[in-house]
Image (cartoon, helix red, strand yellow):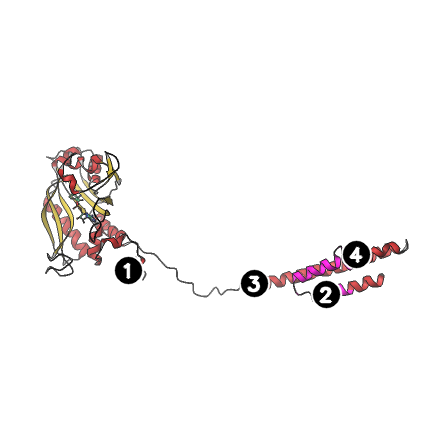
Amino acid sequence: MQDRLKELQIEALEKVAAAADLKELNDIRVSYLGKKGPITEVLKGMGKLSAEERPKMGALANEVRDAISGQMEGKQKELEEAAVQKQLAAEEMDVTLPGRPVKMGSHHPLTSIIEEIEDLFIGMGYTVEEGPEVEKDYYNFEALNLPKGHPARDMQDSFYITEETLLRTHTSPVQARTMEKHQGKGPVKIICPGKVYRRDNDDATHSHQFMQIEGLVVDENIRMSDLKGTLEVFAKKLFGEDREIRLRPSFFPFTEPSVEMDISCKICGGSGCSVCKGTGWIEILGAGMVHPNVLEMAGYDSKKYTGFAFGMGPERIAMLKYGVDDIRHFYTNDVRFLKQFSVEE
Ligand code: FA5
């Protein structure tokens, strides 16, 4: 029995030394030290031994077990360390390699044009106001000299939510709200960019949802020439010094007199082409002197205060500036279109 135990020890230690990985080592542990292993099997025969031999044999069996498990512990550490080193070698990376370029998005062309126009007016002393897109009928129409039933309401076909609320059809209600806030006192000098909604049929130059930028100046002695000068500076800064502007008489119930501003066509230089429909001019905004009724309704003394206002369509301006032939490109989110405005590429 003693010899058999020694044999088993030598055999097990040889196998432990040769184990190639942790799994193999564990298999050796189970097969030699487990309940069904050969050492347990040998010890089952202890019953046949004499009373003196039994403790000696027990002590020897423990020695053999300790020798095997001690060697296994050392081997296990060695194999674990080898596994870590192998993993480290497999995951080795070169931190000096150049990184992969990250694709950058870009500003939407409408955002860019709105920011450019905002900067231009901020440079002329204007502040930027905001107003709600879900608006009261009062501010969208009534406070702008368009009482209920006024035929000019048809100029802007509307999305009503209730009898008294609608999606604003233009940014002009912000004029009324701002003047009301100033409680009849000047000066007021604001622009207001924002979304507006109309029941227009979508085509190359019309959308049912589009942007507008409103402008309003109210003070003593504001004249039509101030409006003209302001619009001229704006147009030349945005489109270039060589562009001409022209004001045409028009009608808006909230301004008197009212005008529309055209800008000379860049494509044909004024001789007429398909973009300007043969006229040499393209309309970009409506404007005029604030109607005395509008000033009075907002609490201003229209004998003391005068003002001018304008409302422009940034989509139309962006179409002209960037040569875009269909307003729907701004809203279909085709990355091939948007990528052309990326500054990184
Ligand atoms: C107005 O909305 C007036 N509130 C502008 C105004 C403000 C006049 C202050 C006087 C004083 P109009 O409906 O013309 O006016 O629209 C102004 C601009 O919005 C147009 O010149 C055009 O550039 C743009 N626009 C109008 N309808 C659409 C549409 N369906 N799609 C895209 N842009 C549009």
| Mark 1–mark 3 distance (CA, rounded to whole Å) | 45 Å
Q: Which residue is mark 2?
A: 15
Q: Secondary structure at mark 4?
A: helix
Amino acid type, label 2 = Lys
Amino acid type, label 3 = Leu
| Mark 2–mark 1 distance (CA, rounded to whole Å) | 69 Å
For residue 102, side relative to residue 119 (left or right): right
Task: Name the image quarter holding residue 255.
Answer: top left
For residue 1, side relative to residue 15 (left or right): right
Q: Are the residues tagged 2 and 1 within 8 Å (C-beta)? A: no
What secondary structure characterizes most of the magenta part? Answer: helix
State yes or no: Cβ of the residue under disc 4 lies below 8 Å from any atom of ligand 1. no
> Local crowd at mark 1 within 10 Å, few (<14), some, or many (≥20)?
few
- Name the disc covering residue 340, or none: 1
- Name the disc covering residue 40, or none: 4
**Lower sequence index among marks 4 and 1:** 4
Amino acid type, label 4 = Thr
| Mark 3–mark 4 distance (CA, rounded to whole Å) | 40 Å
**Lower sequence index among marks 2 and 1:** 2
**Lower sequence index among marks 3 and 4:** 4
> Local crowd at mark 2 within 10 Å, few (<14), some, or many (≥20)?
some
Which mark's residue is nearer the viewer, 4 or 1? Answer: 4
| Mark 2–mark 3 distance (CA, rounded to whole Å) | 27 Å
Residues rendered magenta in the picture: 10-38
**Lower sequence index among marks 1 and 3:** 3
Percent coordinates x, y for residue 138 in the rendering: 20, 34
Q: Which residue is mark 3?
A: 88
**Lower sequence index among marks 2 and 3:** 2
